[in-house]
Amino acid sequence: MTKEELKEVMSNDDIYVIDIRESDELEAETGLEGSVHIPMGKVFTEAFKGNIPKDKKVISICKTGGRCRVLTGHLKEKGFDADFLEGGLNAWNE
């Protein structure tokens, strides 16, 4: 998903945006308003607990988009409607 596409849907109630960066990355650079911070290593634990909704489109963000691309593939395998921000926050902030 491009930054333009994400901007269009950010206010929709049917999306769930996850910032998968580590805590120290959050301290260095702010994320997107409205996103939920769940470090990449904890996403599947939180999904198993039911803390990530399966009835919403899950959009993951990271710094450059690489981690999100990998995570999105795994989420799709687990039955989630998932996408990621292409280029990550670097693209968002350009």
Image (cartoon, rainbow, N blue to C red):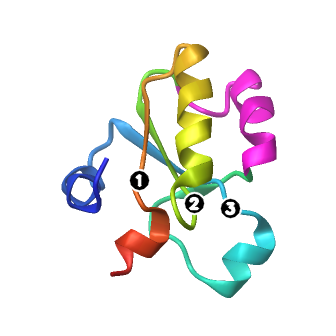
Q: Secondary structure at mark 3?
A: loop
Residue drawn 39% across and 54% down? 86
> Which residue is denoted by mark 1 in the rendering?
85
Q: Is residue 32 visible?
A: no
Q: Quadrant of residue 2?
A: bottom left
Cβ–Cβ below 8 Å for labels 1 and 2? yes
The residue range painted magenta reads 40-53
Sequence order check: which comes first, mark 1 or mark 3? 3
Residue nearest the viewer, comparing 72 with 49: 72
Q: Which mark is residue 62?
A: 2
Q: Amino acid at mark 2?
A: Cys
Screen quadrant of the C terminus? bottom left
**Number of residues whose C-alpha sits closer than 10 Å to that of mark 1, classed few (under 14), some (14–19) or many (20 or more):** many
Q: Amino acid at mark 3?
A: Arg
Q: Is residue 58 visible?
A: yes
> Which residue is denoted by mark 3 in the rendering?
21
Q: Position of residue 14 (x, y in %)?
A: 33, 35
> Magenta includes 27?
no
Residue drawn 20% across and 60% down? 4
